[in-house]
């Protein structure tokens, strides 16, 4: 999970097209399931991204990845927003609770906060991890959201 953060941060400063972004990430993203299909994008979330996952105010989507397979569907999102880790974590926690997501576990390491989440209602069966930590740019945070579901 956190291994994607440095990669996406490096890509954020590179610019370029979505296809260049996709080619760069393909080596890490190739799943072992032959039915899997991977799509990449930047700037705007895919329409089927799970609802109710909070996004910090004034966030800039650095990139996303959606993996579709016969047996599962998953999304990874990386974005950056103004703020500090503590305030961002609190805001995300409040947003998760308001949207019916449960925080099942937490972890803190090297300035990053990790929230394991489980969906309910429209997101029942979805599980994921949200990592929040300081960005390269002072006064900003990076957030990585990974969510998946069985089909």
Image (cartoon, rainbow, N blue to C red):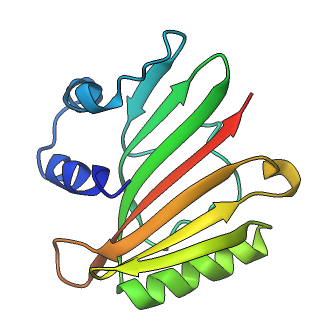
Seen as rendered, the residue at the extreme top is 34
Q: Residue at x 65, y 37 (%)?
A: 48
Seen as rendered, the residue at the extreme right is 121
- Quarter where residue 16 is shown: top left
In the displayed structure, does residue 26 sit left or right of residue 76?
left
Which quadrant of the rendered structure holds the C terminus?
top right
Query: Whole-percent x and y of residue 119?
Result: 75, 57
Query: Whole-percent x and y of residue 120?
Result: 83, 58
Q: Is residue 78 above or below residue 133?
A: above
Instruction: Evaluate whether residue 62 shows in this view.
Output: yes
Query: Whole-percent x and y of residue 14?
Result: 11, 45
Q: Residue at x 49, y 74 (%)?
A: 57
Q: Residue at x 53, y 66 (%)?
A: 55
Please name whichever residue, 20 or 113, is drawn nearer the observer in this view of the structure.
Answer: 113
Seen as rendered, the residue at the extreme left is 14
Q: Residue at x 50, y 33 (%)?
A: 66
Please name whichever residue, 13 or 3, is drawn nearer the observer in this view of the structure.
Answer: 3
Q: Is residue 81 above or below residue 76?
A: below
Q: Is residue 74 above or below residue 1?
A: above
């Amino acid at each position: 999970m956190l291994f994607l953060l440095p990669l996406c941060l490096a890509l954020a400063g590179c610019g370029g097209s979505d296809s260049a972004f996709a080619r760069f990430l393909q080596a890490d993203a190739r799943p072992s399931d032959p039915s899997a299909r991977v799509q990449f994008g930047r700037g705007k979330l895919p329409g089927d991204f799970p609802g109710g996952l909070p996004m910090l105010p004034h966030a800039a989507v650095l990139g996303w990845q959606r993996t579709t397979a016969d047996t599962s569907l998953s999304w990874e999102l990386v974005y950056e927003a103004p703020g500090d880790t503590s305030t961002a974590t609190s805001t995300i926690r409040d947003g998760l609770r308001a949207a019916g997501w449960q925080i099942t576990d937490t972890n803190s390491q090297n300035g990053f906060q990790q929230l394991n989440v489980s969906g309910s209602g429209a997101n029942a069966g979805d599980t994921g991890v949200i990592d929040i930590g300081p960005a390269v740019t002072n006064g900003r945070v990076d957030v990585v959201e990974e969510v998946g579901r069985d089909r």
